[in-house]
Amino acid sequence: MDRLLLIIISIFLPPLAVLLKKGLGKDFLINLVLSLIFLVPGIIHALWVVTNPDY
């Protein structure tokens, strides 16, 4: 998927961006919990997953 589109999705729907990039797994669950507790950590985590090629 296009990286720019994933970055935009990360800002508005962080768990969806992680789901599209990594699939349904631990990264998605971590991001879902972070987003439910407080949105900013979820956005930061999603941006990290989307922009870091080694993650």
Image: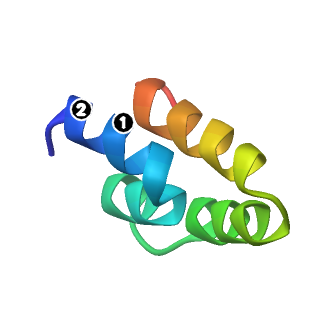
Residue lying at 66% horizontally and 70% vertically, measured from the top left: 32
Distance from label 2 to label 1 (Cα)? 6 Å
**Amino acid tagged 2:** Arg
Residue 18 lies, with reference to residue 36, above or below; the image says above
Q: Is residue 48 left or right of residue 37?
A: left
Q: Residues within 10 Å of mark 2 (few under 14, many from 20)?
A: few
In the picture of the structure, the residue carrying the numbered disc 1 is 7
Residue lying at 14% horizontally and 37% vertically, measured from the top left: 2
**Amino acid tagged 1:** Ile
In the picture of the structure, the residue carrying the numbered disc 2 is 3
Name the spot of residue 29 as percent of width and height, x first. 66, 72
- Residue reaching furthest to the left: 2
From the viewer's side, name the closer residue of 47 and 12.
12
Secondary structure beneath dot 1 equals helix
Q: Is residue 1 left or right of residue 50?
A: left
CB contact under 8 Å: marks 2 and 1? yes
Q: Residues within 10 Å of mark 1 (few under 14, many from 20)?
A: many
On residue 48, which mark appears?
A: none
From the viewer's side, name the closer residue of 1 and 36.
36
Residue lying at 43% horizontally and 26% vertically, measured from the top left: 51
User: Could you say which quadrant of the image residue 38 lies in?
Assistant: bottom right
Q: How is the image coloured?
A: rainbow
